[in-house]
Amino acid sequence: MPIPQTPLFDFDSGAAYLHTTPRHLRRLWQTRKLGGVRVGRLIRFTESDLETFIARGRVEAIQSTSTVRVTRPLKVKTATKVAKSRGAK
């Protein structure tokens, strides 16, 4: 059975594909957030490994017609609290 000929990316070319740095890609590999293939002692990534990583990080937009903004009351310091925080008695 023939082995499919898919291009393999090293850290430099994989980082260029993801528009990131090789160091970041190496960190993703070490924490097993990105899959890859060992070729001897070398680590290589297939295009499907990189695309799977991208798909896993996808965040869908909210399809809402109205936007609700939640605010909390503003904390106001009184003159005595300001004086105490500055060390005045």
Image (spheres, rainbow, N blue to C red):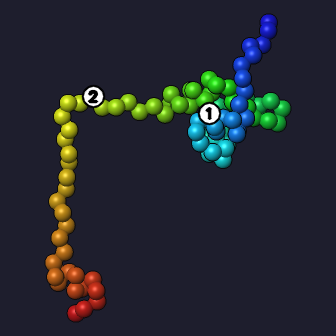
Image-based side of 68 in relation to 3, left or right:
left
Image coords of residue 79 (percent x, y): 16, 82
Image coords of residue 8 (percent x, y): 72, 27
Looking at the rendered structure, the kind of residue marked 1 is Tyr
Judge whether 42 appears above or below 86 on screen: above
Residue 53 quadrant: top right
Residue 84 has which mark?
none
Looking at the rendered structure, the kind of residue marked 2 is Gln
Residue 33 quadrant: top right
Residues at badges 1 and 2 in contact (C-beta under 8 Å)?
Answer: no
Image coords of residue 60 (percent x, y): 38, 30
Residue 17 has which mark?
1
- Which residue appears at 62% of the width and 23% of the height? 48
- The total number of labels drawn is 2
**Crowding at mark 1 (Cα within 10 Å: few <14, some 14-19, many 20+):** some
Residue farthest to the top, as pictured: 1
Q: Earlier in the sequence, mark 1 or mark 2?
A: 1
Image-based side of 62 in relation to 70, left or right:
right
Q: Which residue is mark 2?
A: 63
Image coords of residue 71 (percent x, y): 19, 52
Q: Which mark is in front, 1 or 2? A: 1
**SS label for mark 1:** helix
